[in-house]
Image (cartoon, rainbow, N blue to C red):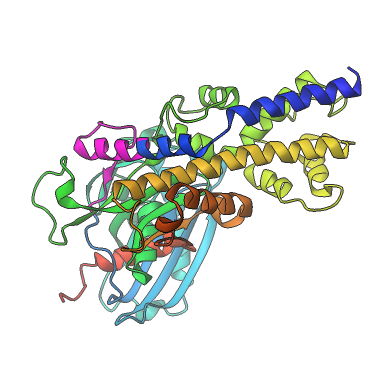
Amino acid sequence: MEAAAAVAMAEQVAADLREKCETPPALLREVASAMAHEMGAGLEKEGGSRVKMLLSYVDKLPTGREEGSFYGLDLGGTNFRVLRVQLGGNEKHVVNRESREVSIPPQLMSGSSSELFGFIASELAKFVADEENSANISNGKKRELGFTFSFPVKQRSVASGTLVKWTKAFSIDDAVGEDVVAELQTAMEKQGLDMHVAALINDAVGTLAGARYYDKDVVAGVIFGTGTNAAYVEKANAIPKWEGELPNSGDMVINMEWGNFCSSHLPITEYDQELDEESLNPGEQIYEKLMSGMYLGEIVRRVLLKISLHSSIFGNIDHAKLKTHFLLRTPHISAMHHDETPDLKIVAEILEENLEITGTSLETRKLVVEICDIVARRAARLAAAGLAGILKKLGRVCNAQEQRSVIAIDGGLFEHYTRFRECLESTLGELLGEEASKSVAVKHADDGSGIGAALIAASQSQYRNVV
């Protein structure tokens, strides 16, 4: 194929992608309305919506008056974090904090439940043993832990819940249908660890709790990382599927599980369809597959593969690497997307090191950056539409500065992918309009899910003083 024809063919693939990934404001408002509608349907009855709207049984968020040492365990991806926070009470907030991050061996992500929780408990025991001031923690009391478990669970109380299914890269069959708190508690006891799980939450609920601890105007906690999810505070009397007495606070934190959202308004391409069909959970987590860190790099890889099979702009290459699923990760496309070197040197290095594509022209490297931009922009704009959907459900879209609304966001995609974050923020403003935007703030909640777990453990503590 002649060079000019090869470039034209590649550019056509990019043009088709751009057209199919278009997200004009009118379409995004339809997505936001569909999200708000699905939220309402999910509150009506179990199974009433693709957005599951799970009751978290957290009806008391931390207030700032909590005191003492509390632990958090945050499990939501290929790493997990353990931490301890010392709370000063009386608005002194977090006096001291220690944490450790641990990588999960890949074989444990598809092994047995006892192996996974045994490994986690052993690392937690090491963390406790390494504390310099561990002697002053017990005082005859059990250590208390908040467990952030970022997978769909059916909760029965604030400290128990059965696993509905795994998402992301986990597939441990014998854990499905089991109480994950009981599994962790058993594993900790085998390690001789005197610790009580005071609360089971997910990363979105933890982010909400951690941010609201410092700012009472926080209405939602959202995760944009390996996966995506959202949680918000709902009035308990607005939850038709709620059974039993209403909580004294009158509120209930809702774990949306919005990654499973799907709508005819979502701009889905052939690459998304193929990715979904070949995934561990076809037909599920469609929203997540369009915009979370787990999948953006994979979408770009699939586009580049099509270009390489239909044109020769990458030269005469061995397609083995380019055909390897998930070889191109979202940090790679972020690095290429942010490459500001005159000759796009970073793009060239990533193509060579990860895909064994060498000797590319500047024109080809610019095309690769454009594909990264198309995929990331679609993701960010769809993410903003989801946030607008939450605000719409809460009646805060036409707020006009009457009530401040803060959305706290955690996760590596939001934190490290600058262009994703900037596009999300500008798109949310575009959807809300100038006046309503003045009363809405998006803020990064650093380590919200980890800190939030410890804070909710404090708010649920069996030793807490009755105020």
Taking the image as shown, residue 449 lies to the left or right of residue 455, namely: right
Residue at 31 percent across and 63 percent down: it is 402
Relative to 82, say whether 49 is above or below.
above
Q: Is residue 36 magenta?
A: yes
**Quarter of the image containing the N terminus?**
top right
Q: Position of residue 212 (x, y in %)?
A: 35, 65
Q: In the picture, residue 145 is in which quadrant?
A: bottom left
Q: Position of residue 120 (x, y in %)?
A: 45, 53
- Residue range highlighted in magenta: 34-57
Q: Is residue 194 visible?
A: no
**Quarter of the image containing the C terminus?**
bottom left
Q: In the picture, residue 12 is in which quadrant?
A: top right
Q: Is residue 322 magenta?
A: no
- Residue placed most toward the observer, 283 or 194: 283
Q: Position of residue 133 (x, y in %)?
A: 43, 80
Q: Position of residue 31 (x, y in %)?
A: 42, 36
- Residue placed most toward the observer, 326 or 372: 372
- Residue placed most toward the observer, 256 or 385: 385
Residue at 42 percent across and 39 percent down: it is 29
Residue at 20 percent across and 37 percent down: it is 44
Q: In the picture, residue 269 is in which quadrant?
A: top right
Relative to 362, say whether 70 is above or below.
below
Relative to 378, say whether 461 is above or below.
below
Residue at 54 percent across and 45 percent down: it is 380
Relative to 99, say whether 238 is above or below.
above
